[in-house]
Every structure is written in C-alpha cells, then in structure tokens.
C-alpha cells in the first residue's frame, strides 16, 4: 500500500519488524496462557479500542492456545491537541464479565500508564483472578505509574505515533507501519 503521507512523518517501525516483535510476544504470552491452574477457562484477551485493534488482532493470532475476546474503550488524551487529559480516564466495557477470569489487556501504547493502571484496578474490583498487559509501544516517561507485562517496543521521546491503529487527527489508522510526528 502506498499512500501520500505528510512530509513530517518519519518511519519508526516497519511492518516486518512489527510482525517479528508481535510473534515474539505471542510466544511469551502463550507460555503464560497455557497455565490453567487458577481457572479452567481460556484467558480473556481484552482489546482497548480503538488504537489497540490492529495490534490486538495480530497478537491473538500469535497465541498458541484458545482465547476468548472482549473489547473496552478507554480515553485518557485528546486527539485534537495530542495532549494528555487532566488525569480523568473514561472507561466503557459493556458486556465484559471478568469474574474468575485470567485477563490479558492489549493496547497500542503505554505512556504514563494511567489507562492500564485504571483498567487493571477496575478488572480486579470486578473479580478477575489474574491480569496481565501487553502493549505495542511502551514510551518511557518520568510520570509513568505502570509497567506493562509484555512490550513489543520501548521508546524514549515525545513524538506522536501514527499508523498501525494509531491516528493523526483521525487519519491514517490503517497504515501498516508506525511513523512518528512531532507533537503539535
């Protein structure tokens, strides 16, 4: 796929590297998922929409055991100005029953970690037996309050990412690579 990209986009991770790192994560997650000693049920993989959708679908196909899937929405920043919100995180997880389940939360990026921390707390309160997290990119920031269980890429820098499920002003979600752009 060839798209006319803005001049400020800089390739960070190409599709081959993303696929390779996702396969490695899938193998690690598979080892964890095979242990059913805490519950007889398959792990519940929860996709954090919208950004995590592409990574989610690729990662769960790399997991070598059966999984259940669920979806939730969590917002902690404004895509209009690429600024993080004042700490308020909006969660929406209709029809998601985590009671007695081992849960894997899958998201595109972990910056401060407030979203993943909030989801983990919510799922713990709802009775999840064990919760792990997997993210495509873990951006190392000083204000971080959370470290994901599994990470495909670690990144240091303030650039905004676009592609592979992440958007630039509601554009280019569908790029198969990940690009950085300077925060506006």
Image (spheres, helix red, strand yellow):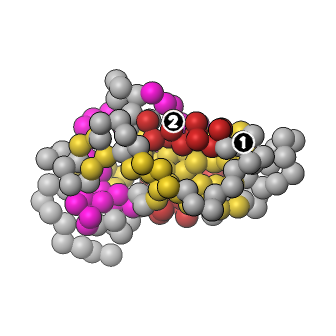
Q: Is residue 25 visible?
A: no
Give the residue at x 25% y 66%: 171
Contact? badges 1 and 2 (CB < 8 Å): no
- Rounded to the nearest angstrom, the CA distance separating label 1 from label 2 is 16 Å
Q: Which span is picked out in magenta?
A: 145-171
Asked if residue 14 lies in the magenta stretch, the reply is no
Element carrying mark 2: helix
Element carrying mark 1: loop
Give the residue at x 23% y 47%: 82
Magenta stretch mostly in which secondary structure?
A: loop
Point out the residue furthest to the top here: 142
Nearer the camera: disc 1 or disc 2: 1
Asked if residue 160 lies in the magenta stretch, the reply is yes
**Residue 136 or 74: which is nearer the viewer?**
74
Residue under pointer 1: 127
Q: Is residue 115 left or right of residue 163?
A: right
Q: Position of residue 68 (x, y in %)?
A: 70, 61
Q: Earlier in the sequence, mark 1 or mark 2?
A: 2
Q: Position of residue 14 (x, y in %)?
A: 37, 57
Q: Position of residue 175 (x, y in %)?
A: 34, 66
Q: Position of residue 49 (x, y in %)?
A: 46, 59
Residue under pointer 2: 117
Q: Is residue 184 visible?
A: yes
Give the residue at x 74% y 48%: 99
**Residue 158 or 15: which is nearer the viewer?**
158
Vertical side of 35 occupied by 63: above or below: below
């Amino acid at each position: 796929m060839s798209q006319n990209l803005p001049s400020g986009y800089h390739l960070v991770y190409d599709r081959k590297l993303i696929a390779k790192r996702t396969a490695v994560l899938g193998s690690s997650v598979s080892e964890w998922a095979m242990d059913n000693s805490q519950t007889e049920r398959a792990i519940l993989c929860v996709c954090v929409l919208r950004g995590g959708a592409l990574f989610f679908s690729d990662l769960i196909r790399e997991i070598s055991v059966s999984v259940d899937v669920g979806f939730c929405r969590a917002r902690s920043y404004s895509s209009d100005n690429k600024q993080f919100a004042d700490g308020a995180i909006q969660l929406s997880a209709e029809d998601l029953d985590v009671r007695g389940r081992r849960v894997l939360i899958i998201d595109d990026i972990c910056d401060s970690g407030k979203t993943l921390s909030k989801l983990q707390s919510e799922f713990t309160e709802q009775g999840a037996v064990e919760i792990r997290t997997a993210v495509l990119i873990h951006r190392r920031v000083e204000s971080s309050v959370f470290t994901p269980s599994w990470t495909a890429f670690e990144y240091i820098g303030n650039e905004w990412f676009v592609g592979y499920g992440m958007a630039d002003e509601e554009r280019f979600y569908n790029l198969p690579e990940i690009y950085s752009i300077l925060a506006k």
